[in-house]
Image (cartoon, grey):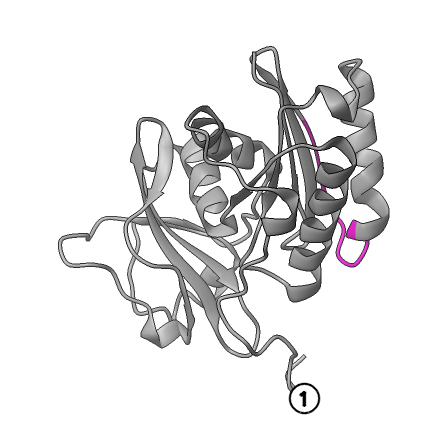
Amino acid sequence: MTTLLALDTATECCSAALLHEGSVTARSEVIPRQHAQRLLPMIEELLSERELRLQDVDALVFGRGPGAFTGVRIATGMVQGLAFAADKPVIAISNLAALAQRAWREHGTDTVAAAIDARMDEVYWGLYGLQDGVMQPLDEERVCAPEAVSLPVGVSSVAGAGTGWQYADRLAVSVTQSWPQMLPDASDLITLALPRWLAGEVVDAADAQPVYLRDKVATPKGQA
């Protein structure tokens, strides 16, 4: 059976999850600025609990962004290092898609507008719909001002997930309900990655790249 190890540090939440013998075990902590110290111990705990070595994993999964610049880099660097060491392939998953998947898992919402606070008075934005239990993109991900978000023609009833929804009064889209405190979780990366693994959609460690959605990654002075 498939064994996948997932990790994510793109937001305030640091998480890791392991799929083995059909079940998922996970660790998740909201620990801003402590991801680099906590992520590897989380991974080691998960492997130890299931009496596995890194070499027993079929593929490594990571949240490739968008999200905090430093956090996305931590996840990318960690997954590259582990994949090189164990000679394993990598699967990169959108953090916006992971948010949508979590909204489905926890609340049963099958169309989700995922939004992450991008700082600089912007949000990372993506729209997803459920297909065979997995959230699929209904539009391109982007970064924009809250007032500039939109839904594709024909889409109207959606729920909102992610820290970008703290700007609900400014977002140019109305939703049936929203969860502005929701953060991506590695457990949902597993769900999104499994179909890709089965379809052979993997990359080499060297090709595991972060996605920022914008070139400006530093917060201007006075806007921290």
The x, y position of residue 136, in whole percent, is: 34, 41
With respect to residue 132, does 39 lie above or below?
below
Q: Is residue 31 magenta?
A: yes
Q: Nearer the viewer, residue 83 or 118?
A: 83
The x, y position of residue 105, in whole percent, is: 45, 31
Image quarter (top left, top right, bottom left or bottom right) of the N terminus: top right
**Displayed quadrant of residue 210:** bottom right
Number of numbered markers: 1
Residue at 76%, 51% (x, y): give it.
31
Q: Amino acid at mark 1?
A: Gly
Give the residue pinned by disc 1.
222
Q: Nearer the viewer, residue 62 or 16?
A: 62
Residue at 86%, 48% (x, y): give it.
37
Apparent side of residue 104 relative to residue 129 in the rendered image (left or right): right
Apparent side of residue 133 relative to residue 38 in the rendered image (left or right): left
**Displayed quadrant of residue 131:** top left
The x, y position of residue 81, in whole percent, is: 76, 44
The furthest residue to the left: 154
Q: Is residue 54 magenta?
A: no
Q: Nearer the viewer, residue 169 or 7?
A: 7
Highlighted magenta segment, given as a residue range:
26-35
Q: Secondary structure at mark 1?
A: loop
Q: For mark 1, does the 10 Å Cα neighbourhood hold few (<14), some (14 to 19), or many (20 or more) residues?
A: few
Image quarter (top left, top right, bottom left or bottom right) of the C terminus: bottom right
